[in-house]
């Protein structure tokens, strides 16, 4: 009997594959949407990074100290060096350094070995000023404690009662002195040095000796050092170096300081004393640091141009459509660009002749970037130095000379506010008054703008005894300060960029869920198609087999006839 063919009648896989290609088209659209959203999310990340970098730059420039730059130059740097913080009076000062401040050093009589036992008990180390006795008028010697420096205790027991152990215990207490062991060639001596210079940091060491005698020269009492006692009876260590104050003369005025770093003699200037000047005056010149100011203005221009470059790249239009920016046509990017440009184009009420960036040589170019005219900036620094800081930072000016500006917050708004006082403040009484007609918060002689008012956070200090109207304060935010505020809002966790990126992230998550749901649906559709065409293939194969069988039978009958 002839064999019946069982080959497949149709290509089920090919047919199902073709049908599924059509069914998957919506999935491709979803994937394209998701890719577009992810590209935009990445672009916002780039923008956020650029704005954050920009804020770091303008935030630093929002400080007046960046523009009130001054140089302090010593004619003889080996005698002293100096720095100025921007608030010093420009000019020259004649400084004579007669004596450097020094720390007191006291030493224990030598012992043969660092492992030799000294004794046990407790050391109390105090700081203060020793004044020797005066014959006329008769005044006894005295030791006055330093009120700004607390005494400290060191316990010496069997675990640390050697010379080396006492040294280590004193250093471990970290209480304002250092202890070292010096070998003088014949013996080892413990040397105790005050960490700070000046007469006010002289040393006094009292001992609670476990042998019962706190002043003799035996046991731990060897370390006793009372400058008012006698040698061998409570003043048992010897002085190697007396505590000394720095003695200098500034423009004919004698100045005495406990430290060689003098920051409160000339307002706004810190002087670092290095050696004496041999009775010769050394010139200190304080001047505007033009190079530093130019550096700050250049940094502002560069920072602005960098963030605008980023915005331009992200929003650019390419006619071919192949390299257009990911944020082309984006309303948020346009809004940010507009806000930044608007600030740069404003004028600032500095109270002086310089009120805009163009006044110092900074202006827009045709490409939207800023450029700096160095010559114009130099002229502005030379002729209107005081105005430049106000052009960039926060500043304020008062009409009453006894009212001074102390500070503000990001919520303080630009404006002119009247100040009234109903109760004068002091160290024990808080001030009562109002700023901008709204009751402020008083603290001693300070008055602070009320929460919710335009003057919120504005801090002023009011001196004098006059109550009632105390003039006005005009508060101004310069370019860097205004940009810093805008960037704060944009980069805040609940700001514009966060809202935009959160929305895009939610859209991406929604599309991912749609993709997952659609993939499940496609699996069911594919199974249905495969089942349908498999059954059709089986039916057609069966019909083909029947047809072949009948043909074979007919052929067989014909042959037998």
Image (tube, rainbow, N blue to C red):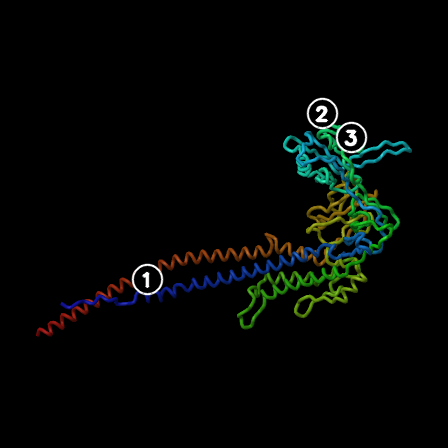
Residue 360 in which image quadrant: bottom right
Reading the image, the residue beneath label 1 is 529
- In the picture shown, does residue 358 fall above or below 180? below
Residue 196 in which image quadrant: top right
* Disc ID at residue 195: none
Q: Quadrant of the C terminus?
A: bottom left
Residue in view at x 84 percent, y 53 percent: 282
Cα gap from disc 2 to disc 3, whole angstroms: 16 Å
Looking at the picture, how far across and down is residue 502, in whole percent? 54, 55
Reading the image, the residue beneath label 3 is 232
- In the picture shown, does residue 545 fall above or below 244? below
Q: Nearer the viewer, mark 2 or mark 1?
A: 2
Question: Which sits in the foreground, 417 or 182?
Answer: 182
Cα gap from disc 2 to disc 1, whole angstroms: 106 Å
Q: Secondary structure at mark 1?
A: helix
Residue 5 in which image quadrant: bottom left
Question: Which sits in the foreground, 209 or 45?
Answer: 209
């Amino acid at each position: 009997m002839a064999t019946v063919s069982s080959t497949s009648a149709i290509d089920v896989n090919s047919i199902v594959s073709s049908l599924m290609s059509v069914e998957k088209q919506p999935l491709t659209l979803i994937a394209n949407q998701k890719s577009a959203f992810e590209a935009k999310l990445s672009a916002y990340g780039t923008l956020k990074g650029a704005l954050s970098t920009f804020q770091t730059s303008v935030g630093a420039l929002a400080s007046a100290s960046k523009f009130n730059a001054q140089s302090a130059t010593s004619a003889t740097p080996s005698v002293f060096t100096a720095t100025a913080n921007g608030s010093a009076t420009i000019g020259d000062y004649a400084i004579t350094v007669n004596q450097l401040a020094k720390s007191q050093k006291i030493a224990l009589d030598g012992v043969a070995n660092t492992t030799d036992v000294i004794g046990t008990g407790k050391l109390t180390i105090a700081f203060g000023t020793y004044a020797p006795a005066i014959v006329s008028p008769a005044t006894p010697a005295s030791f006055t404690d330093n009120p700004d420096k607390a005494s400290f205790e060191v316990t010496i027991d069997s675990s640390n009662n050697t010379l080396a152990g006492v040294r280590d215990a004193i250093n471990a207490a970290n209480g304002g002195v250092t202890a070292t062991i010096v070998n003088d060639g014949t013996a080892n001596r413990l040397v105790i040095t005050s960490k700070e210079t000046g007469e006010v940091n002289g040393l006094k060491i009292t001992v609670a000796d476990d042998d019962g005698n706190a002043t003799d020269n035996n046991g731990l009492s060897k370390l006793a050092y009372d400058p008012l006692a006698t040698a061998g009876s409570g003043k048992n260590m010897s002085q190697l170096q007396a505590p000394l104050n720095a003695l200098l003369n500034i423009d004919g005025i004698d100045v005495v300081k406990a430290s060689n770093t003098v920051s409160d003699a000339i307002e706004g200037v810190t002087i670092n004393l290095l050696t004496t000047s041999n009775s010769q005056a050394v010139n200190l010149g304080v001047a505007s640091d033009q190079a530093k100011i130019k550096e700050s203005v250049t940094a502002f221009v560069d920072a602005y141009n960098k963030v605008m470059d980023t915005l331009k790249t992200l929003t650019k239009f390419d006619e071919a459509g192949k390299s257009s920016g990911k944020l082309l046509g984006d309303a948020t990017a346009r809004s940010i660009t507009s806000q930044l440009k608007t600030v740069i184009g404003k004028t600032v009420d500095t109270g002086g002749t310089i009120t805009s960036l163009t006044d110092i040589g900074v202006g827009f170019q045709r490409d939207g970037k800023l450029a700096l005219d160095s010559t114009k900036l130099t002229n502005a620094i030379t002729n209107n130095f005081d105005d430049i800081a106000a052009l960039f930072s926060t500043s304020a000016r008062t009409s009453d000379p006894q009212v001074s500006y102390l500070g503000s917050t990001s919520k303080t708004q630009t404006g002119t506010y009247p100040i009234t006082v109903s109760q004068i403040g002091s160290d024990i009484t808080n001030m009562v008054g109002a700023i901008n007609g709204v009751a402020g918060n008083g603290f001693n002689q300070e008055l602070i703008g009320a929460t919710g008012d335009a003057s919120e956070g504005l801090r002023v200090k009011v001196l004098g005894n006059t109550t009632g109207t105390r003039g006005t304060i005009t508060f101004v935010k310069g370019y860097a300060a205004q940009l810093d505020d805008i960037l704060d809002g944009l980069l805040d966790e609940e700001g514009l960029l966060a809202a935009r990126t959160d929305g895009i992230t939610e859209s991406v998550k929604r599309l991912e869920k749609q993709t997952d749901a659609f993939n499940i649906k496609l699996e069911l559709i594919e199974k249905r198609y495969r089942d349908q065409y498999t059954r059709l293939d089986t039916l057609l194969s069966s019909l083909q087999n029947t047809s072949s069988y009948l043909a074979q039978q007919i052929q067989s009958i014909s042959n037998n006839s």
